[in-house]
Image (cartoon, rainbow, N blue to C red):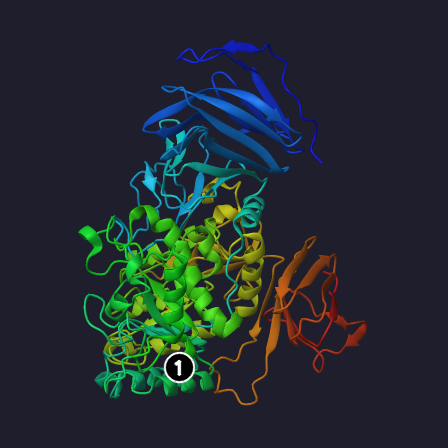
């Protein structure tokens, strides 16, 4: 229930408009309260503010509201014309016109205020809302961060920056085109504008922060939260959750930019044989993989986008002579296959009578979009036709995509002048939705699609990759920043092109990048000429010295696979509550100024800190550990006090990682995928626990159907770990166990050796479990 709703004391003022309209009675101010927030509207001059009641902190206050209908009209005064226990309605008087606008504030819940801005006498072309800058840090909106005065994470300094995609950004690399009309701040509030209109933001310039949308009306939300997690949870409720992919998509996915290349180097005659040769090599080197995808040119056709528009496979002798057999072969190995698509009109699409009426021919570049324009799938006819040809192809073609067994798509472009700029946000939602539905109708929840161009609610349908990163350490650093920033706009199923995009990749860069990508939800690895780890140049000369690149690839693909129980659980939580898997440091430590603009390390969940090596020839790197106690995750033994910067050792096959004292991390081999090298394979879990005195820890393990809490405590000399049936048996590994322990499992005393093992040198105790388990370790007095 809300607290009382009341109006402040004040005389009624009779105010005439500047054009001598009839006088309107205006209250000097009005207040509406919830249990947590106070909304105060000042009538003349018009403004409103939101205050956190518990502290008296003014979270935000407006300095300008503007409607453009021919000319810009600023709200100068407002009259409260209606009120309830949860809402206020006002008529707004505008400068320069006799027209009026309408503003409505509604408490959606005690922490969220909905604000609706509309014009009473027409349809504006733009609406602007401006707030007083109070020095707060601003996170979100864009995947990219390339403006000169802004930081890596903090958006301050953005100057009238649009929400266009960023293919070919002026600074940085990749094509970081994911964005959302949402930001959260260090002042315990966020703003979500629920609109797909073209928009612009100015952040922290000249004492102001503003947004403006080319829309006739807008609805936005002021979201309060004492922590960033609470703000993201409210945003998730308002905007809808994100994609929960099939289990196989958590395993590494391998691909090539063009399977018609590099045939001789791999001893094969055609693209299809190369696909299968790569699958053979993955098995030979025991590299887990749940999927592969074929990039353009997968199909037949000519023109600017060779191999696109016919929705088929190139079945020539050097292509994919029998795609159905290839797909079946991969499926038998446990590998799913995706293909490249885009919203561009080419080849058979150009003569499709159901698509032709809906080509974009104006408002995009090159002038007139006469070569390869996009299709306006806002129209249901075009939307459904596009989806249908992705499923069943064209009748004059020998093959198709989804109906032949393709699992989903890699969606490219949509931000390169192929559609009008004004429609980019909406199309970056509709294309992912259409592609997702095309697969879902055949594959159900085993379908999987990813894209680099996504807007807001499009996160429900696709994963995101950061685009075509430069093949150097700057490109890797840019990809890291972009992945960290994606979490701030609630896009959690993310990845980057391992090693950068489509050119020879130095061994060192490849090794560092795959270590980083082992610690993100979507691990995709680009093979190709001079960038295939089991081929030259990695098998000759200095590149062939240990550690071999194949050894490094096997290590990190297996590590990524082994972290699936942890990653999958975190991602499921993200789909419901918004908190991402890859977390910017201020998401977890909002009160630590040392991490406020830090993007060269991140939290994987709230327990594992990952610090990729992004400097060439480095063998160490500086790592900042926030307050608390930490363990080196490579040896799980070295204990370090937080609140300091340390120098971490980083040989070529190591990425610095640290785990919080008290953490619970479930790991294991729960997905078979292409593992045909393990006889009698069966799923198994191992649960790591780092008990800390006085701390009760919990981890919500997602078993594929429900969350199963794992709860651990250490009180005095007694350590306890409890959980219900997790659906998969395995073992518990407890660390920092300083003395030979006595152990019970479900009340039964266990004997060191047969029933559990204690490793004094590594202070580790291991015990198997089956079903619901209560494991109690009593340590010897110290």
Residue at 59% x, 39% y: name it.
Answer: 226
Tag 1 residue: 282
Observer-nearest residue: 759 or 340? 340
Which quarter of the rendered picture does the C terminus lie within?
bottom right
Q: Secondary structure at mark 1?
A: helix
Residue 692 % position (x, y): 65, 57
Residue 601 % position (x, y): 43, 54
Residue 128 % position (x, y): 40, 32
Position above or below: 606 against 128: below
In this rendering, position of residue 52 left or right of residue 171: right
Observer-nearest residue: 420 or 530? 420
Q: Quadrant of residue 141?
A: top left
Observer-nearest residue: 202 or 187? 202
Residue at 33% x, 71% y: name it.
Answer: 526
Observer-nearest residue: 704 or 625? 704
User: Dot 1: few (<14), some (14–19), or many (≥20) neighbours within 10 Å?
Assistant: many
Residue 554 % position (x, y): 42, 77
Which quarter of the rendered picture does the N terminus lie within?
top right
Q: Residue furthest bottom?
A: 679
């Amino acid at each position: 229930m809300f607290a009382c709703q009341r109006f402040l004391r004040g005389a009624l003022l009779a105010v005439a408009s500047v054009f001598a309209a009839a006088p309107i009675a205006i209250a000097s101010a009005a207040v509406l309260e919830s249990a947590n927030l106070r909304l105060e509207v000042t009538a003349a001059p018009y403004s409103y503010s939101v205050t956190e009641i518990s502290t008296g902190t003014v979270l935000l206050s407006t300095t300008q509201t503007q409607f453009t209908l021919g000319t810009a009209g600023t709200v100068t005064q407002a009259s409260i014309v209606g009120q309830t226990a949860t809402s206020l309605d006002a008529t707004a008087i505008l400068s320069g016109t006799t027209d009026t606008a309408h503003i409505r504030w509604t408490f959606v819940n005690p922490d969220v205020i909905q604000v609706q801005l509309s014009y009473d006498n027409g349809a504006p072309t733009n609406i602007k809302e401006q707030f007083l800058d109070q020095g707060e840090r601003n996170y979100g909106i864009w995947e990219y961060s390339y403006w000169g005065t802004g930081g890596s994470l903090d958006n301050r300094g953005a100057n009238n920056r649009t929400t266009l995609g960023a293919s070919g950004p002026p600074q940085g690399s990749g094509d970081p085109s994911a964005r959302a009309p949402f930001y959260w701040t260090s002042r315990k509030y966020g703003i979500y504008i629920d609109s797909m209109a073209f928009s612009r933001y100015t952040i922290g310039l000249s004492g102001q922060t503003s947004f403006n949308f080319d829309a006739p009306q807008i609805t936005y939300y002021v979201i309060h939260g004492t922590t960033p997690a609470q703000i993201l949870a409210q945003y998730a409720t308002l905007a809808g959750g994100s994609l929960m992919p099939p289990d196989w998509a958590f395993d590494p996915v391998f691909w090539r930019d063009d399977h018609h290349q590099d045939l001789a180097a791999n001893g094969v005659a055609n693209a299809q044989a190369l696909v299968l040769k790569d699958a053979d090599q993955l098995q030979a080197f025991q590299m887990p993989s749940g999927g592969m995808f074929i990039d353009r040119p997968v199909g037949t056709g000519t023109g600017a986008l060779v191999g696109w528009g016919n929705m088929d496979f190139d079945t020539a002798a050097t292509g994919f002579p029998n795609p159905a057999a290839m797909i079946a072969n991969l499926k038998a190995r446990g590998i799913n296959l995706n293909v490249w698509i885009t919203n561009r009109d080419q080849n058979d699409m150009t003569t499709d009578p159901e698509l032709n009426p809906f080509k974009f021919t104006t408002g995009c570049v090159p002038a007139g979009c006469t070569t390869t324009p996009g299709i306006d799938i806002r129209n249901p006819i075009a939307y459904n036709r596009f989806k249908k040809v992705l499923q069943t192809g064209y009748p004059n073609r020998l093959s198709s995509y989804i109906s032949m067994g393709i699992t989903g798509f890699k969606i490219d472009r949509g931000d390169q002048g192929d559609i009008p700029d004004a429609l980019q946000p909406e199309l970056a939602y509709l294309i992912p939705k259409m592609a997702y539905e095309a697969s879902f109708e055949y594959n159900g929840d085993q379908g999987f699609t990813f894209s680099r161009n996504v807007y807001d609610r499009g996160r429900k349908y696709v994963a995101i990759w950061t685009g075509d990163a430069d093949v150097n350490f700057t490109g890797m650093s840019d990809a890291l920043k972009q992945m960290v920033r994606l979490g701030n706009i609630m896009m959690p199923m993310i990845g980057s092109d391992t090693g950068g995009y489509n050119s020879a990749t130095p061994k060192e860069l490849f090794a560092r990048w795959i270590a980083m990508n082992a610690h993100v939800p979507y691990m995709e690895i680009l093979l190709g000429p001079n960038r295939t780890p089991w081929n030259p140049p990695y098998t000759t000369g200095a590149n062939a010295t240990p550690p071999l690149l194949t050894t490094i690839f096997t290590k990190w693909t297996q590590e990524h696979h082994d972290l699936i129980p942890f990653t999958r659980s975190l991602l499921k939580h993200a789909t419901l509550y918004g908190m991402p898997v890859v977390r910017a440091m201020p998401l977890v430590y909002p009160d630590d100024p040392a991490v406020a603009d830090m993007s060269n390390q991140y939290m994987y969940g709230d327990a594992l800190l990952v610090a990729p090596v992004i400097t060439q020839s480095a063998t160490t790197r500086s790592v900042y550990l926030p307050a608390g106690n930490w363990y080196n995750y490579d040896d799980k033994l070295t204990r370090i006090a937080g609140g300091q910067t340390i120098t971490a050792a980083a040989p070529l096959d190591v990425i610095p990682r640290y785990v919080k004292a008290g953490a619970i991390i479930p790991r294991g081999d729960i997905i078979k995928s292409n593992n045909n090298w393990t006889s009698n394979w069966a799923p198994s879990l191992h649960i790591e626990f780092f008990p800390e005195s006085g701390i009760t820890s919990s981890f919500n393990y997602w078993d594929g159907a429900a969350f199963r809490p794992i709860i651990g405590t250490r009180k005095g000399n007694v350590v306890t770990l409890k959980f219900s049936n997790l659906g998969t048996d395995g073992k518990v590994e407890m660390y920092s166990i300083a003395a030979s322990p006595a152990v019970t499992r479900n009340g039964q005393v266990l004997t060191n050796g047969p029933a559990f093992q204690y490793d004094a040198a590594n202070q580790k105790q291991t015990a198997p479990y089956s079903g619901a388990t209560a494991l109690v370790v009593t340590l010897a007095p110290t």
